């Protein structure tokens, strides 16, 4: 396949800071907390690398794993993985992304990172000082939906994530890139850029190498992002934490093209409904588009769903369209504090996203919440419109409310309602074979998408800076919304922004 079908799917490019520790009892579980951090630019520059390296030890209650807790500033957008690479070890922070499958790192000699303002902030790798570096080839190429790309060399290296060491891991060096941060892709090996672009055989990516080297039992991991205000979450390779969700963990089949191996974490979203404050039952979102294929992607800050669905939700919630942000905003944030929720249905399995997780505050390039000129904060729906079935995404505005297990061996997603801010822990290893996810039962009924096209990379988004100034005091789509200052912007899904003398032109 060509480069345009490489799937990374990362709206606003989120990633998680993590540390990894092998279980002391050999149970094949690797557990570590994850940390959100704020982007400082549209290229998502690292904010305070030194702070990302602070750690303290915290043991799971069952003593089977050791979790390294990270102390970092409160933030909004980005999630990073703290690793070391090479011999001697070099510290790096990488975005962690379930929507792509390659690890690639920034290098100091690249044109971007060698600029005088150091957009990569020293978060770079130097292969010339590492005795474990081994060159493979110069075939690394990946491009995302916003036009950003990375080109460079494939090589192998020693990686340390927490106190677990992976040797001979294939990764790439971004010698020519427009993105100022590296990525840790943990998707299917079939979705590696090398396999998709050149139609070569895939190589063992990080999850496969972990299993091959005995660090985990199965090709699987679970993700717990916690709520919007939390600074840490958790990802566990080879296991689940049953104390981090409520209700039943339900397994959904991953949708694939008939006769083609699974390559993305795409499942069928069969419906949505709105549970308004004070209501005892949810009202269905009227749309003939269901079921639709959706990618469960940790590398996406927002969701991307069909326009008709977004319009229906916005009408029910009283939101109006803003061309500047490419989505629907509210005149005030009062609804954010109401007790309603948006319900996502996967056959008979439902996951509820509370209003205060679904309605979010857009930020500028420094992580500051956008405000109107009167100082009032701006609130928006956590969805961006997309009418391309290959780019329907359930990103972090959904995933924070869901506990998700990615089972690459059985091509299943197990999902449950997250238990926000749980301080308990009960980590269980995922076993080999079918039905290996502890406590998970198959969904009783679901209408599946049986023909799923491979999606293009959709790492897209924008970070505007300044204050929104509606000319008529509203957020009507006909209003001109001016900004005090603007930073370079990426492209929302199909929405292009025009910049004229420091003002977003409607």
Image (tube, rainbow, N blue to C red):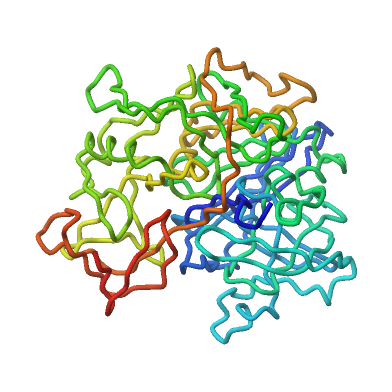
Q: Which residue is drawn at 28% across and 50% down?
A: 379
Location of residue 4 (image quadrant): bottom right
Image coords of residue 315 (percent x, y): 22, 37
In the picture as drawn, the residue positioned furthest to the top comes out as 444
Q: Residue at x 73, y 34 (%)?
A: 238
Q: Quadrant of residue 263?
A: top right
Residue closer to the observer: 458 or 401: 458
Image quarter in which the C terminus is found: bottom left
**92 or 252: nearer the viewer:** 252
Residue drawn at point x = 60 percent, y = 61 percent: 143
Q: Residue 230: x percent and y percent?
A: 46, 46
Query: Relative to 136, is 430 on the left or the right?
Result: left
| Quarter of the image where one finds residue 249 | top right
Instruction: Give left or right: position of 151 versus 149.
Output: right
Work out whether residue 21 or residue 466 is closer to the camera in this orientation and state it.
466
> Furthest residue to the bottom?
116
Total of numbered circles in the picture?
0
Tell me if 121 is positioned left or right of 75 in this view.
right
Q: How far from the left and from the top, in percent, is residue 54?
A: 62, 60
Q: Residue at x 37, y 46 (%)?
A: 385
Q: In this view, does 131 lie to the left or right of 229?
A: right
In this rendering, the answer to whether 325 lies above or below 500 is: above
Image coordinates of residue 505 in percent, x first then y, are 25, 68
Q: Is residue 344 above or below residue 464?
A: above
């Amino acid at each position: 396949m060509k480069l345009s079908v490489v799937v990374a799917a990362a709206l606003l490019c989120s990633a998680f800071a993590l540390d990894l520790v092998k279980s002391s009892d050999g149970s094949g579980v690797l557990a570590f907390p994850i940390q959100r951090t704020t982007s400082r630019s549209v290229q998502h520059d690292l904010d305070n690398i030194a702070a990302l390296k602070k750690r303290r030890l915290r043991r799971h209650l069952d003593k089977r794993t050791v979790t390294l807790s990270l102390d970092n500033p409160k933030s909004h957008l980005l999630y990073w993985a703290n690793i070391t690479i090479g011999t001697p070890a070099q510290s790096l922070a990488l975005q962690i992304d379930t929507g792509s499958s390659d690890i690639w790192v920034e290098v100091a000699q690249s044109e971007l990172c060698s600029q005088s303002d150091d957009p990569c902030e020293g978060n770079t790798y130097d292969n010339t000082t590492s005795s474990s570096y081994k060159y493979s080839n110069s075939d690394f190429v990946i491009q995302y939906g916003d036009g950003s790309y990375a080109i460079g060399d494939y090589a192998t290296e020693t990686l340390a994530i927490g106190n677990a060491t992976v040797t001979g891991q294939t990764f790439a060096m971004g010698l020519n890139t427009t993105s100022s941060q590296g990525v840790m892709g943990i998707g299917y090996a079939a979705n590696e850029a090398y396999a998709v672009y050149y139609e070569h055989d895939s190589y063992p990516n990080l999850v496969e190498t972990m299993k091959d080297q005995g660090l985990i039992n199965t090709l699987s991991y679970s993700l717990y992002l916690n709520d919007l205000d939390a600074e840490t979450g958790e990802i566990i390779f080879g296991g689940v934490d049953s104390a981090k969700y409520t209700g039943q963990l339900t397994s959904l089949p991953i949708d694939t093209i008939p006769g083609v191996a699974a390559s993305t974490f795409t499942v069928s979203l069969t419906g949505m409904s709105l549970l308004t404050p004070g209501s005892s039952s949810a009202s269905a979102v009227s749309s003939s588009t269901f079921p639709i294929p959706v990618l469960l992607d940790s590398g996406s800050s927002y969701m991307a769903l069909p326009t008709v669905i977004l319009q229906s939700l916005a009408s029910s919630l009283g939101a109006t369209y803003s061309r500047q942000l490419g989505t629907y905003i509210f005149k005030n944030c009062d609804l954010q504090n109401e007790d309603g929720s948006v319900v996502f249905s996967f056959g008979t399995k439902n996951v509820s996203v509370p209003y205060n997780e679904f309605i979010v505050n857009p930020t500028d390039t420094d992580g500051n919440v956008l405000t109107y000129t009167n100082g009032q904060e701006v609130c928006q729906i956590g969805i961006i419109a997309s009418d391309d079935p290959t780019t329907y995404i359930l990103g972090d505005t959904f995933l924070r409310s869901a506990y998700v297990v990615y089972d690459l061996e059985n091509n299943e997603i197990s999902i449950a309602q997250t238990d926000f801010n749980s301080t308990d822990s009960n980590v269980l290893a995922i076993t080999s074979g079918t039905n290996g996810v502890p406590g998970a039962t198959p969904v009783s009924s679901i209408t599946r998408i049986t023909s799923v096209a491979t999606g293009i990379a959709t790492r897209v988004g924008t970070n505007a800076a300044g204050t929104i100034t509606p000319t008529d005091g509203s957020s009507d789509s006909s209003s001109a919304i001016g900004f005090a200052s603007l930073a370079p912007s990426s492209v929302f899904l199909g929405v292009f922004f025009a910049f004229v003398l420091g003002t977003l032109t409607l």
